[in-house]
Image (cartoon, helix red, strand yellow):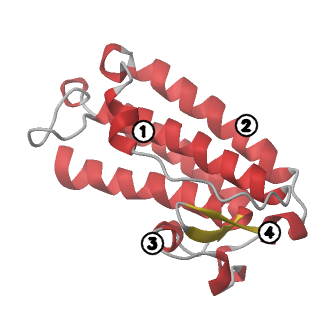
Amino acid sequence: MNSSQLLETECSGPFANYVREAGEVNLIEELEISLHDFIRFVQNIPLDKFDYRYAEGKWTIKEIIQHLIDCERIFAYRALRFSRNDKTELPGFEENDYVDNTDANKRGIQDLLTELSAVRHSTLLFYKSLSDDQLKRIGTASTHQISAGALGFVIIGHQKHHQKVFVERYL
């Protein structure tokens, strides 16, 4: 599935911003490529930057990586529900509460990247298992309609968004 194949009805609200951020890409290929690009990028960040906050109350790079892990799990879970034709409306979540309840800053960067890689491999296997029909199935999450396929592009775009934030505000 390519992002250009998404219909407007498959993605609304703030999710659409992340789909745009993903760019014109193939879902499976970009899930793989973006993971490797991100790991290489993070491994080149100076060690003293991982615990840095560019302003009071902002997350560290380690906390953002944990945030990416948590969000990918949530987005993939939503995609699973929708791909199985579950019509239950799924609530949003408070991302700050999630970050506040991790010990990301006590973890090593390699440990975080290993977990991110494991989660992404699970996401990849899941998306590779879906038919075109399952990818197009739509559900409601955080009061917005979105398809299982679009959620895959949200995962990619969300990661790319935070990588840009690293460059603009942390490095």
The residue shown at (69%, 84%) is 7
Q: Between label 4 and label 2, give the one nearer the viewer.
A: 4
Few, some or many C-alpha atoms within 10 Å of disc 2 (few <14, some 14-19, many ≥20)?
some
Whole-percent x and y of residue 73? 60, 40
Query: Element type at marker 1?
Result: helix
The residue shown at (39%, 43%) is 95
Whole-percent x and y of residue 93? 46, 47
Which numbered disc covers residue 20? none
List the residue tagged with mark 1: 67
Name which residue type carries label 4. Arg
Tell which residue pokes out farthest to the front in this image: 88
Cα gap from disc 4 to disc 1, whole angstroms:
26 Å
Can residue 35 be seen here? yes
Q: Between label 4 and label 3, give the one nearer the viewer.
A: 4
Name which residue type carries label 1. His
List the residue tagged with mark 3: 17
Cα gap from disc 3 to disc 1, whole angstroms:
18 Å
Question: Residue 1, located in which quarter of the rendered image?
Answer: bottom right
Q: Are marks 2 and 3 in contact (CB under 8 Å)?
A: no
Name which residue type carries label 2. Ser
Q: Nearer the viewer, residue 139 or 169?
A: 139
Name which residue type carries label 3. Asn
Which comes before the other along the chain, label 2 or label 3?
3
Tag count in the figure? 4
Which comes before the other along the chain, label 3 or label 1?
3
List the residue tagged with mark 4: 137
The residue shown at (48%, 66%) is 18
